[in-house]
């Protein structure tokens, strides 16, 4: 098959970033041929509920979809599910489907997302060992959880922590095991991560922290997890949440620069490959504020980068400079996190950590580099304003709930410290 090269835009990867990019191309006036190619069998859907309400059976399948059925046809977007792309050739501006069909394009957007990191452990291929990325994964996990006696969640990052909470809320016995001293400690630091450790403990999750899993045991089906310090933790269902790996294989094979994501400039155009763009979990985008390539694996990044890439595909040349932002819900604790704390020298808390109602600020050289509101709402804007301003703050005023956040910042910084060398936000 061949197309008129000047009229065809192709998006590879029909997830959130791809779907929002396709929508934006149409709302912003692109009237050429538009293909949205996805390897999954259904139309684009949102993943955050897969570890939360959907896993618990509280949200139905229809609520996951990014767009109503009929949206793509109504906007003349050729959505082709079950259509994995096998190769791209930026030189000839062609791509090849796994089926062998070739398609020419003028502009190409890669939104291929990420895949769960597989742990090469003995026994990892036993029945009863699960990962969580797709709706099918969530369905399989929910069905297995309904039959399971004891679930072991390996990994204390976002997916492991949220799934452990949901499985516990479903009434399962849950053990959460991982090498860190508290869930989420790598991002939040010990003081704030302790809130999550206590939250899980209070809900009856058994925490086996500070130890690595070195193998899984069972006869055909998993029966236990073995840790490096010699403990055997029984479990007839194991969920591995060991992070995700960006799906860069198409870009790598085509010779595009890849370093923890496809390297794209601040307009989200691939470095050294004009006409090829990347957005969402698969991208590592140059961020003008941080003067660094940022690889962000969070919902808001996919939601906003997809449309940003689309506008640049239309020739707008707009830098993508939003602050990183993500959210998480575990039990009755909801949080939002803005900014990037690659390093910090102080954490300031406004509110009450023990009551799980607070705003935490990560400071470097007296400047707020990140902020997290937990069960406190409608403060994202002032938190982001503090971060963006780069102004020095008085920690006492920052901690004082009687002083509006808008009034906390001091004078504009005259000697800003160097930007942090950031790479990955997970
Ligand atoms: C269980 C779970 C819970 C989450 N919860 C939160 C949360 O609470 N808060 C938050 O901020 N973020 C959360 N996230 C992260 C958020 O969902 C992701 O950042 C977002 O889905 C990324 O969107 P994307 O479009 O970049 O990639 P994806 O949603 O992964 O979509 C990429 C699509 O591309 C397809 N694809 C890949 N290769 C090819 C190919 N060669 N050909 C065709 N198609 C291809 C994939 O099959 C997939 O459908 C969660 C993620 C998961 C998995």
Image (cartoon, grey):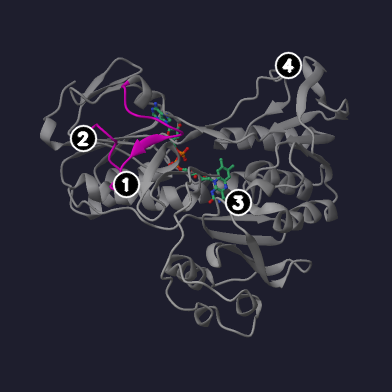
**Please, what secondary structure does the residue beneath circle 3 have?**
loop
Report the front residue among 31 and 284. 284
- In the image, residue 95 sits, relative to residue 302, either above or below, namely above
- Which of the two discs, 3 and 4, sits closer to the camera? 4
The question of residue 30 being in magenta is answered with no
Q: Secondary structure at mark 1?
A: helix
Label 1, label 3: how far apart the Cα atoms are: 25 Å
Residue that appears at 68% across and 18% down: 125
Q: If you read the primary sequence from the N terminus, does the residue marked by circle 2 or circle 4 appear first?
A: 4
Taken as a whole, is the magenta stretch helix, strand or loop? loop
Q: Which residue is mark 4?
A: 122
Q: Earlier in the sequence, mark 2 or mark 3?
A: 3
Mark 4 beta carbon near ligand 1 (under 8 Å): no
Is 308 placed left or right of 195 in the picture? left
Pointers 1 and 4 in contact (CB under 8 A)? Answer: no
Residue shown at the point (49%, 46%) measured from the top left: 46
In the picture of the structure, the residue carrying the numbered disc 2 is: 274
Residue depth check, mark 2 versus mark 4: number of the one nearer the observer: 2
Label whose residue precedes the other's in the sequence (3 or 4): 3
Q: Which mark is residue 21?
A: 1
Question: Residue 356 placed where, x, y %?
Answer: 73, 66
**Gap between marks 3 and 4, in whole Å?**
35 Å
Q: Nearer the viewer, mark 1 or mark 2?
A: 2
**For the residues marked 1 and 2, what is the alpha-carbon distance in whole angstroms?**
18 Å
Nearest-to-viewer mark from 1 and 4: 4
* Quadrant containing the N terminus in the rendered view: top left
Question: Is residue 258 covered in magenta?
Answer: yes
In the rendered view, would you say 370 is above or below 7?
below
The magenta stretch is 254-273
x 73%, y 25%: residue: 128
Circle 3 sits on which residue? 59
């Amino acid at each position: 098959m061949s197309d008129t090269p000047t009229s065809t835009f192709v998006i590879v990867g029909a997830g959130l970033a791809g779907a929002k990019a396709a929508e934006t191309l149409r709302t912003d006036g692109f009237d050429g041929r538009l293909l949205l190619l996805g390897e999954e069998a259904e139309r684009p859907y949102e993943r955050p509920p897969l570890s939360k309400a959907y896993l618990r059976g509280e949200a139905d399948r229809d609520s996951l979809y990014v767009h109503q059925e009929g949206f793509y046809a109504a906007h003349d977007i050729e959505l082709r599910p079950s259509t994995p792309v096998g190769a791209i050739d930026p030189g000839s501006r062609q791509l090849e489907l796994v089926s062998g069909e070739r398609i020419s394009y003028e502009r190409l957007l890669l939104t291929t997302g990420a895949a769960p990191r597989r742990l090469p452990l003995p026994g990892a291929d036993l029945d009863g060992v699960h990962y969580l990325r797709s709706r099918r994964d969530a369905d399989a996990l929910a069905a297995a959880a309904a039959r399971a006696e004891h679930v072991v969640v390996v990994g204390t990052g976002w997916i492991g922590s949220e799934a452990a909470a949901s499985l516990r809320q479903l009434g399962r016995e849950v053990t959460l095991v991982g090498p860190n001293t508290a869930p989420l400690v790598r991002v939040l630091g010990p003081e704030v991560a302790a809130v999550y450790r206590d939250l899980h403990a209070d809900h009856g999750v058994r925490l086996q922290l500070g130890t690595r899993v070195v193998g899984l045991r069972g006869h055909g089906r998993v029966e236990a997890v073995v840790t490096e310090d010699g403990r055997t933790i029984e479990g007839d269902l194991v969920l591995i949440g060991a992070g995700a790996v960006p799906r860069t294989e198409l870009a790598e094979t085509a010779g595009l620069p890849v370093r923890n994501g496809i390297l794209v400039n601040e307009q989200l155009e691939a470095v050294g490959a004009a006409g090829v763009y990347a957005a969402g979990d698969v991208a590592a985008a140059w961020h003008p504020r941080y003067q660094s390539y940022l690889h962000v694996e969070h919902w808001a990044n996919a939601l906003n980068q997809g449309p940003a890439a689309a506008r640049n595909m239309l020739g707008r040349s707009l830098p993508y400079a939003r602050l990183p932002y993500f959210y998480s819900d575990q039990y009755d604790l909801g949080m939002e996190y803005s900014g990037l704390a690659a390093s910090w020298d102080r954490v300031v808390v406004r509110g009450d950590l023990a009551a799980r109602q607070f705003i935490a600020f990560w400071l470097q050289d007296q400047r707020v580099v990140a902020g997290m509101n937990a069960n406190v709402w409608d403060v994202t804007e002032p938190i982001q304003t503090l971060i963006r301003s780069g102004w020095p703050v008085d920690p006492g005023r920052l901690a004082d709930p009687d002083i509006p956040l808008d009034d906390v910042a001091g004078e504009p910084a005259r000697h800003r410290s160097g930007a942090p060398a950031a790479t990955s936000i997970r």
